[in-house]
Image (tube, rainbow, N blue to C red):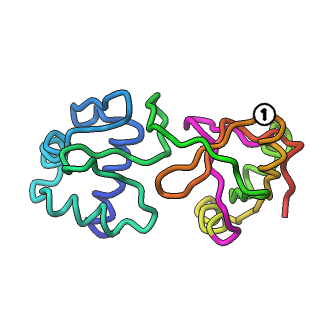
Amino acid sequence: MDQKTQIGKFIALILRHKPQVIGITLDEHGWAKVDELIAGIQHKYPHFNKDFLEDIVASDNKQRYSFNEDHTSIRANQGHSIPVDVELQEVVPPVVLWHGTGEKYVSSIDEIGLIPKTRLYVHLSSDVETAHKVGIRHGKCVIYQVDARKMYEDGYHFYLSINHVYLTKAVPIQYLHKQ
């Protein structure tokens, strides 16, 4: 793994799960001060600077991060395990959404549905290809079709992150169809 990837993963750990590993705190909306983030990361990667951070954010194919308007603060767009309000927009979902997972999780999902586990939300994709890319990271991929519109009509809430990931608190088994 190249150093850019290593640092990108380290940033994800900090902004989604453990800001304390570099001695920073996030505000209630998940924002960290860029200068504090850089200073904290420089203890592990001394050459890290704002240009390097800007490059990581700009080149991230999953658009994991956002800067505020003047680039003095940064946050992860979703995927948090710590309680933050990233000001998600509630939306009416498409008729169908998709969830990719590893085969090792199928028996649990078939029994209790999709739950966020250590995260705040279940992550859903608008297309099968993206769900497959997510699922393959966990071993042999299994895809679930989610009856999202039916869930919404039944009173469940859906949110759309800035990087186009659909989020919901849980998906009960009656809305899931294994592909």
Is 155 placed above or below 73 here?
A: above
Locate the C terminus and report the quarter of the image it occupies. Answer: bottom right
Q: Where residue 126 sits in the image (x, y, percent)?
A: 66, 62
- Residue 76 or 13: which is nearer the viewer? 76
Q: Where residue 127 sits in the image (x, y, percent)?
A: 68, 67
Q: Identify which residue is drawn at 87% across, 55% down.
A: 177
Instruction: State which quadrant residue 94 falls in.
Output: bottom right
Span of residues in magenta: 113-129
Q: Identify which residue is drawn at 57% across, 49% down.
A: 160
Residue that label 1 marks: 155
Given the image, on which type of amino acid does mark 1 rest?
A: Gly
- Residue 153 or 139: which is nearer the viewer? 153
Q: Secondary structure at mark 1?
A: loop
Instruction: State which quadrant residue 136 falls in.
Output: bottom right
Count every numbered label the image shows and give the total. Answer: 1
- Residue 25 or 95: which is nearer the viewer? 95
Q: Identify which residue is drawn at 78% across, 58% down.
A: 96
Residue 123 falls inside the magenta stretch: yes
Q: From the viewer's perspective, is 47 left or right of 81?
A: left
